[in-house]
Amino acid sequence: LLRWNEVRYSKKGLPPGTMGWPIFGETTEFLKQGPNFMKSQRARYGSIFKSHILGCPTIVCMDPEVNRYVLMNESKGLVPGYPQSMLDILGKCNIAAVHGSAHKLMRAALLSVVSPTMIKDRLLPKVDEFMRSHLRNWDRQIIDIQDKTKEMALCSSLKQIAGIESGPLSESFIPEFFKLVLGTLSLPIDFPGTNYRQGIQARKIIIKLLQKLIDERRASKTEKDDMLGFFMSEENKYKLKDEEIIDQIITVLYSGYETVSTTSMMAVKFLHDHPKVLQQLREEHLAIREKKNPEDPIDWDDLKAMKFTRAVIFETSRLATIVNGVLRKTTKDMELNGFLIPKGWRIYVYTREINYDSFLYSEPLTFNPWRWLDKNLESHNYFFIFGGGTRQCPGKELGIAEISTFLHYFVTKYRWEEVGGDKLLKFPRVEAPSGFHIRVSSY
Ligand code: HEM
């Protein structure tokens, strides 16, 4: 079978590599050995090799220059290649499901609700208010910071999107959102009880809840200063249909959920392990607090002054590798770096190893936020922490604003120690399977 499968995919011009078993391919090796599988294949076949993972014939690309090319050249037939379950559950107007001019429109509309002006005037005040109340009463508690940062990412988004705070709406929304997330990561098997079916049902409920909200707002003719209010506003030049607005909202919730929460959790972990970094971070935040009354919120100028915080966030994302890479697929046969890639194949733009490249980052395994202050690393050509090219993360600054505000209140109010023994998995996702527990006390 192994041989048959190799012959089946042995088209001339394809990169070297192995295809594993029919149907399963090399998915088990990929998930079990993770980064080591990728590194050993690279050692054997070079930075571009073929494989069969997660149900598709795939070209894994670990070459920074070629990765950059793939990200910059969507128009040449390199469109997002995310799994079917994700597309079904996130909706047909979801940004990852649209290409060309439709993508341009959806992206521009999305960028307008997370623009610097929106963050400054409308979103940051909400984030600030949310973080204050979320971090209240942690004193002398043992908390699971993984749980708390997940709740934080979701509830902070709900507040920014539609002013949704604790109450009946959030109580019906949150469990459905969790089902939706699980569904997007499952095999598309539409059978009663499967995660996929539950995800599809959760999507329907979420659509109903959001549509009701839109109808109520329209009927009451009130204009709110949140993201939904901006999408619906007369002055907004992007006139989206209701179903498009709803898919945009689901996109914002989904894209900012695991990224923001995991980065925040890992920042807490690295700060705990590196007291000098924590000390400098705390000084930055105490200096901001000193100029304010206790009740004054974090504003745009404060955010801009948080230079070291930004460096801590980048260094956390780099060292923990919150995002291993992104997926594309070919819409036609094409040539890539001298190889011929058939139509419909996945391209795994695998960026993880770039984070540990000693040419870009000296002593790459050391947690050293100062490296981001010395040089302008954020604008180098292979900075892929937030993706790149036409689909570079539109929520980057909003995500950084949220994590910075969280860190502001966390490090100025509390000190903490790990309760210990909690395991952290690094691959395929950064997570603490049994939670990540810390003992918190007031500072
Ligand atoms: C630390 C936090 C974050 C990280 C590390 C991150 C990372 C990324 C990456 C790597 C991509 C590229 C995906 C691809 O090329 O297929 C991306 C795209 C995207 N991100 Fe983020 N993200 C973060 C926060 C957010 C937030 C808060 C939002 C909310 C608005 C958001 C919304 C999006 C959207 C909508 C896309 C797709 C853009 C497109 O297809 O044009 N992200 N993000």
Image (tube, helix red, strand yellow):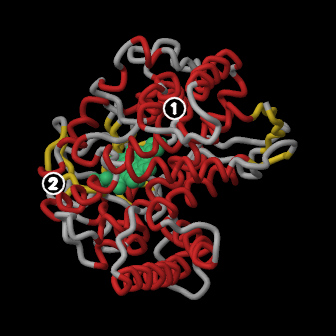
- Foreground: 163 or 56? 163
Q: Quick check: 267 above or below 162?
A: above
Question: Which structural element holds mark 1?
Answer: helix
State which quarter of the image contains the N terminus: bottom left
The reply, left or right, for residue 299 in relation to residue 47 is: right
Residue at image location 20% in from the left, 60% down from the top: 103
State which quarter of the image contains the C terminus: top right
Residue 389 lies in quadrant: top left
Amino acid type, residue under disc 1 in the picture: Ile
Q: Residues within 10 Å of mark 2 (few under 14, many from 20)?
A: some
Residue 241 is at least partly visible in this image = yes
Residue at image location 27% in from the left, 69% down from the top: 233
Q: Where does the image place residue 431, in percent across and percent down from the top left?
A: 64, 47
Question: Which structural element holds mark 2?
Answer: loop
Q: What residue is shown with label 2?
A: 77
Q: Where does the image place residue 223, in percent across and percent down from the top left?
A: 35, 71
Q: Where does the image place residue 346, in percent across and percent down from the top left?
A: 31, 54
Q: Which mark is residue 313?
A: 1
- Foreground: 310 or 46? 310
The reply, left or right, for residue 271 in relation to residue 232 is: right
Is the CB–ligand 1 distance for label 1 below 8 Å? yes
Q: Where does the image place residue 432, in percent across and percent down from the top left?
A: 70, 47
Residue 212 lies in quadrant: bottom left
Amino acid type, residue under disc 2 in the picture: Gly
Q: Earlier in the sequence, mark 1 or mark 2?
A: 2
Disc 1 and disc 2 in contact, CB within 8 angstroms: no
Please state which of the two labelled residues, at mark 1 or mark 2, is closer to the viewer.
Answer: 1
The reply, left or right, for residue 287 in relation to residue 420 is: left
